[in-house]
Image (cartoon, helix red, strand yellow):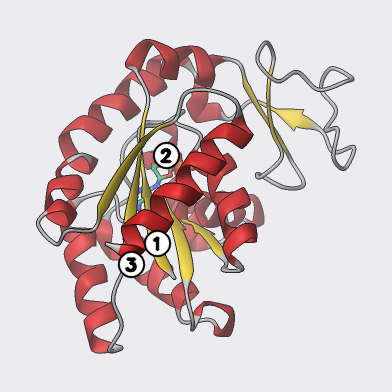
Amino acid sequence: MRIVLVGPPGAGKGTQAAYLAKNLSIPHISTGDLFRANISQGTPLGKRAKEFIDAGELVPDEVTIGMARERMAEPDAVNGFLLDGFPRNVAQAEALDAALKGDGVALDAVLDLEVPEDEVVKRIAGRRICRNDSAHVFHVTYNPPKTEGVCDVCGGELYQRADDSEETVRRRLEVYHTQTEPIIDHYRAQGLVVTISALGEVTEVTERAMAALKRGAAA
Ligand code: AMP
């Protein structure tokens, strides 16, 4: 399957993407994770992306689209993938459509995770991520690790993303509404959008998402 995951920052895209990708046996491709890996390795792409990410802005399309396409061309993504955080504006969606068309394939579904705005701010403020694996996500109140600052899964150090500060989160939400939300209409016109609530336990949301994807694929 070829799936795009959309939703505001804090909707739980990364967490859900990790579970869904595993359930569906497809790679989880997160442009945010690819940027963070480039930043920690100090690559030129990482240096270019960092100033935009720290400000809560989108990294320019000419950097992002090439990076996403390169990752999607790797052998593990030939038969499907779950895109998390890409596309994030209409120009990226159009570039993705054209690339897939060129390969003679198409998206199966766009899964839209809905969550109220006040919940988003609460979720992000308490979010802590493992340095070893960004799929290991905790929350100081909702999902605290057994030992503060230590990942339950692998013992890695937990940290707060620099762009999870309240001011940057507000800007990321604005960017989501103005630039990313329009891709939902873009894909609705193609009959691809399935919307689910992202509220509740992580496992409940995963079950809801799997059921919605099955319905979407059958429609
Ligand atoms: P995420 O981990 O998906 O929340 O992404 C973190 C940050 O990386 C975003 O706030 C953007 O600055 C940048 N980013 C991730 N994906 C994209 C994209 N598709 N286009 C532009 N910027 C992106």
Quadrant for the N terminus, please: bottom left
Asked which secondary structure carries label 3, the reply is loop
Q: CB atoms at circles 2 and 1 under 8 Å apart?
A: no
Asked which secondary structure carries label 1, the reply is strand
Task: Identify which amino acid the numbered label 2 is placed on.
Answer: Ile
Residue at 28 percent across and 53 percent down: it is 60
Residue 189 higher or lower than 94, as above or below: above
> Quick check: 73 left or right of 196?
right
Lower sequence index among marks 2 and 1:
1
Residue 36 higher or lower than 164, as above or below: below
Residue at 44 percent across and 33 percent down: it is 54
Lower sequence index among marks 3 and 2:
2
> Quick check: 195 left or right of 129?
left
Residue at 84 percent across and 17 percent down: it is 148
Residue 137 versus residue 61: which sits nearer the camera?
137
Residue 86 visible to an observer of this rendering: no
Residue 46 visible to an observer of this rendering: yes
Q: Residue beneath label 3, please?
A: 108
Q: Residue beneath label 2, please?
A: 53
Q: Nearer the viewer, mark 2 or mark 1?
A: 1
Residue at 9 percent across and 56 percent down: it is 189
